[in-house]
Image (cartoon, rainbow, N blue to C red):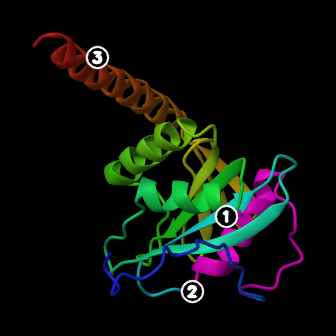
């Protein structure tokens, strides 16, 4: 037996106290989620992404910094978000990232990332409630297809974004099952 081998490590979930002090303890309204992510991301000068983990009653279980990017991009790996959601037993997730440029209209990569997250998390029975793009003046809800100007307290709808994200999600689900079917058939044909 190898005496140099260490024991198996124990995996634990730990929460850091006072990561962010907020009066928002529950995100059962979209405005609560927007306010929370706006407070955390609007002043960042580089792109950052966060995930807010919620239980079945939409109480905030925790917030995790997912990625730090540069002035133009940030990553949001499905695996990292799913792992953290599973470890804290979250039923719902809200993701957000900022656009330091000042505009909060999502890019095509933002839509693709949101679609992949929604599909990926659904495999673990975790619901992606929304994906927000944050700027200093407002927040864009990708799932709702709407931009909210926090200064003016106004909303502007973008119905084409809601349709595009739905279409992308359908495409990714079909691609996932087609890939699985091909792998299964490869195993059958020997």
Quarter of the figure that contains the N terminus = bottom left
Q: Position of residue 129 (x, y in %)?
A: 66, 46
Determine crowd level at label 3: few under 14, some 14-19, many 20+ residues with C-alpha closer than 10 A: few
Which residue bears the numbered disc 1?
Answer: 52
Which residue bears the numbered disc 3?
Answer: 181
Foreground tag (3 vs 1) = 3
Sequence-earlier tag: 2 or 3 = 2
**Marker disc for residue 43:** 2
Give the residue at x 62% y 57%.
85
Q: Position of residue 72 (x, y in %)?
A: 31, 73
The vertical placement of 104 against 113, above or below, is below
Foreground tag (1 vs 2) = 1
Give the residue at x 28% y 17%.
181
Q: Secondary structure at mark 2?
A: loop
Describe residue 76's horizontal placement relative to residue 91 as left or right.
left
Describe residue 176's horizontal placement relative to residue 55 as left or right.
left
Residue 105 or 53: which is nearer the viewer?
A: 53
Determine crowd level at label 2: few under 14, some 14-19, many 20+ residues with C-alpha closer than 10 A: some
């Amino acid at each position: 037996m190898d005496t140099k081998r260490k024991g198996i490590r124990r995996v634990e979930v730990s929460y850091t106290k006072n990561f962010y002090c907020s009066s928002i303890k529950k995100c059962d309204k979209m405005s609560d989620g927007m306010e929370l992510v706006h407070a955390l991301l609007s002043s960042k000068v580089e792109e950052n992404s966060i995930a807010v983990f919620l239980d079945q009653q939409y109480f905030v279980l925790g917030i995790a910094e997912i990625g730090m990017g540069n002035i133009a991009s940030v990553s949001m790996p499905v695996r990292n978000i799913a792992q953290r959601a599973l470890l804290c037993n979250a039923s719902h997730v809200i993701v957000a990232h900022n656009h330091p440029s000042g505009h909060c209209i999502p890019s095509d990569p933002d839509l693709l990332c949101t679609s992949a997250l929604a599909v990926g998390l659904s495999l673990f029975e975790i619901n992606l409630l929304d994906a927000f793009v944050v700027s200093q003046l407002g927040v864009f809800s990708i799932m709702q297809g709407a931009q909210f100007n926090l200064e003016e307290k106004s909303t502007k709808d973008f119905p084409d974004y809601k349709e595009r994200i739905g279409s992308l999600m359908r495409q990714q689900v079909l691609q996932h099952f087609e890939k699985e079917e091909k792998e299964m058939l490869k195993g059958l044909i020997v």
